[in-house]
Structure formats: structure tokens, C-alpha cells
Amino acid sequence: MTPGDLARHTGATIGYARIEAGKLVEESSGGLHFQAASLGKTVTAALALRHLDLDAPMRTVGWTPPFDASDIRVRDVLRHTAGLSLPDYPGRDPEAPTPELSASLDGIGAPEPLRRIGPVGRFAYSGGGYTWIQLALAERTGRSLDSLARDWGLRFDPSGLALATGHDVTGGPLPRFRYDGAAAGLLATPAAYARFLIEAPLAALAVDPVATGGADGLWPFYALGVEIDGRIVGHHGVNRGFRALAAFDIETRDGLVLFAARDGTADALEEAYRDWRRISLRAGRGVG
């Protein structure tokens, strides 16, 4: 399915980039920044690999938890195996005040406080855990997540950017809901995210994967900020009005980035991913 096919099929504004053998060969967005949602978790994990000790105990960094975190390490949070709650952030109205990032972990401006809900080792998706990682990065580096991400041409601060408008499933425009930080706040053009995939240490993130328990068999494993499908690593993203998917073959260094500014487009993006995967297989460049 081509970008044009996706646009006609979904009625959405589409952002697209394609990588072959570690080089960006095709992209389409006109410089428009999309909400890339949870694709920012891969960016955050790459920054953690650069700046944090992955075996450091989380109780000593970023935020003081009101629960026993003595057995939780940085890598456990990145793998969603720290036994933490707060899976998602719903986004704030554009005019709503912005709470302190640490306050969201206490339940201010978030659906719930970050809580301990299970043992280390079992997969339990936690966007709030990535907020904790963001606070640890700020403490360690003295820089904001936006400042760190700019090293790869990516943004978490919308100031001065040409932003895509999200739409509901009927095609009606939505307000620009605000998503702050590592959990869901990444803003990117397809080309910028593709360049990140080329430059980032993705093989080092794809270690020690854990089964996610998904019933559909799609992307069945998760590692350090990446979903895993065979030797392909990537991530899906869902914000109100936006869907995103990125995939990168670690061996061939082929890749795909897809953004859609409309709800209800996730299945179409997944179909486009599967088409890309099949074509790569036939060409001898995809997953074995």
C-alpha cells in the first residue's frame, strides 16, 4: 500500500518515509510535524542507554516513589516489566494548565498516580514509567527531553513547529490535545524519525525481550523501548487524532515510518507495514 493509497483509503493526512540499506530513499510530509505518540519511547530508551546506568535502582533517580521500588532497575522500566501502573495519558486540552512533570506521577493531570501493581519481570505497559525515566534523564544531564531529542532532529516541545491537525474517525478536526514528554509527546516529521532509526543503537535496545501476551500475535515481544517482530524492531503510537508506526530491520537496515492524522487508521498502517514486509521478503531484504 503506497502513501497515496493510504491517504485515499483512510482520508487522512499521511506522513511517510522509507529506508533502504540504511539510507533514506523516500519521504513525504512537506516538513509537517505529526504527533508520533509512543514512538517517543524508543527515543527515550536510546537516550537512557546513552546517559543512564540501566542496572541502577530507580528508587535513587528522578522521583521519590511512595511505594517500595528497591527491586526496580532502569531497564525494568524501559521494558515495561517494573510492575507499574499508569499505562496511558489521555492528553490535555490545549488551554489547560501544564502540571509539573513529577506531579503527573502523583496523579495530577493524569488518570491515576503511578503505583506498584505487580512484581518485576511481568509485562505491564506503563507510560508513567517512561515519565519517571524522563525525570531521571533530566536529573542526570541537566537538559530537557526536548533538548536531548534535538540531537536527532526530533522534538517534544511544539514551539515554532508546523503541526499536523488530528481528526476523529469521521474526519472532523480535533483540538491539538497536549501530550507531555516521553510517554506520548514526541513530535516528528517522517524523515526526522527515519534518520533517528538509521542513527540510533537499535540493536542494543533489542536485547532480553519479554513476551507481551498479545492475543493477535502481532509484534509479540518488547525490549528496551522497542516492539519486536522477528528481526524487525519498531513501535506503534496512538494519540487522540493520530496513529503512528515505525519499523526497522536490524540486519538489512531497511525501514518504514508511517504517520496518519486521523483516528481509526491503525489497521491501515498495519496493512501497509505487512505489505512492506512481504515485498522485502521477496526481494531478499526482509525478515527470514
Image (cartoon, rainbow, N blue to C red):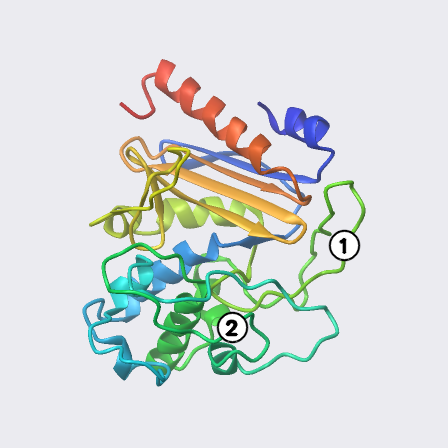
Which residue is disc 1 drawn over? 174
Mark 2 Cα-neighbour bin, 10 Å: few <14, some 14–19, many ≥20 = some
Q: Amino acid at mark 1?
A: Leu
**Image quadrant where one finds the C terminus:** top left
Image side of residue 53 versus residue 155, left or right: left
What residue sits 40% from the left and 82% below the top? 142
Check residue 83 in the rendering and tell me which mark sits there, or answer none: none
Mark 1 Cα-neighbour bin, 10 Å: few <14, some 14–19, many ≥20 = some
Image side of residue 15 versus residue 112, left or right: right
Which residue is disc 2 drawn over? 112
Question: Which of labels 1 and 2 is toward the front?
Answer: 2
Q: Amino acid at mark 2?
A: Glu
**Image quadrant where one finds the N terminus:** top right
Residue 154, image x and y in percent?
Answer: 51, 58
What residue sits 57% from the left and 33% below the top? 267
Measured in 3D between alpha carbons, the distance from the residue under mark 1 to the one under mark 2, in whole angstroms, is 24 Å
Residue 231, image x and y in percent?
Answer: 28, 34
Q: Secondary structure at mark 1?
A: loop
Residue reaching furthest right? 172
Q: Is residue 43 above or below residue 217?
A: below
Residue 71, image x and y in percent?
Answer: 20, 73
Image quarter for residue 263?
A: top right
